[in-house]
Image (cartoon, grey):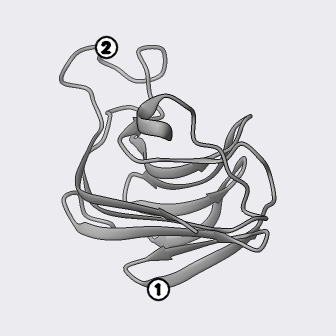
Amino acid sequence: MTSNGTANASWSPASGTHTMVIDEAITHLPNTKPHVVAGQIHDSADDVTVFRLEGTSLYVTDGDTTHHKLVTSTYRLGTRFQAKFVASGGQIKAYYNGVLQTTISNSSSGSYFKAGAYTQANCDNSDPCSSSNYGEVIIYGVTVTHS
């Protein structure tokens, strides 16, 4: 949000520099479908790129290509890490613990950052349908800058 929460954030990777850094740890995954998104760039239509944990494999996605870049295949729940996106010059760079993982070409409009626990499971695809079946991300800090 901008203007003290009165307007939606909206920018393009083609103009300016837009950065989000998340200091976080994924601590719990849903049962049958153990997938959680822990930070992302979304545009006016859909997610552009995300950090996505599937079991022990952490990926950076490129649109609907969910396995675009394997960051690690041995992620342990509770491991604290830094996810960083830098969008500038029609490109999005994704970093894991300060190491560049991938560069994605993108100049969409209506872009904004999201940080949190976005499970890819629901009561239709993950049993049991109960409060004990959840995804969880601890966020220690988020920094967003635009210039």
Residue 129, disc: 2
Look at mark 1 in the image and give the residue it sits on: 99
Picture residue at 79% right of the left edge, 61% below the top: 106
Relative to 96, does residue 140 appear above or below in the rendering?
above
Residue 140 x, y percent position in the rendering: 20, 58
Secondary structure of the residue carrying numbered label 2: loop
Q: Is residue 15 left or right of residue 19?
A: right
Picture residue at 71% right of the left edge, 42% below the top: 110
Residue 18, disc: none
Picture residue at 49% right of the left edge, 28% below the top: 6
**Kind of residue at badge 2:** Cys
Residue 96 x, y percent position in the rendering: 43, 75
Residue 99 x, y percent position in the rendering: 47, 86
**Kind of residue at badge 1:** Val
Residue 132 x, y percent position in the rendering: 18, 24
Q: How many residues crowd mark 2 within 10 Å: few (<14), some (14–19), many (20+)?
A: few
Q: Is residue 36 left or right of residue 106?
A: left
Q: Is residue 1 visible?
A: no
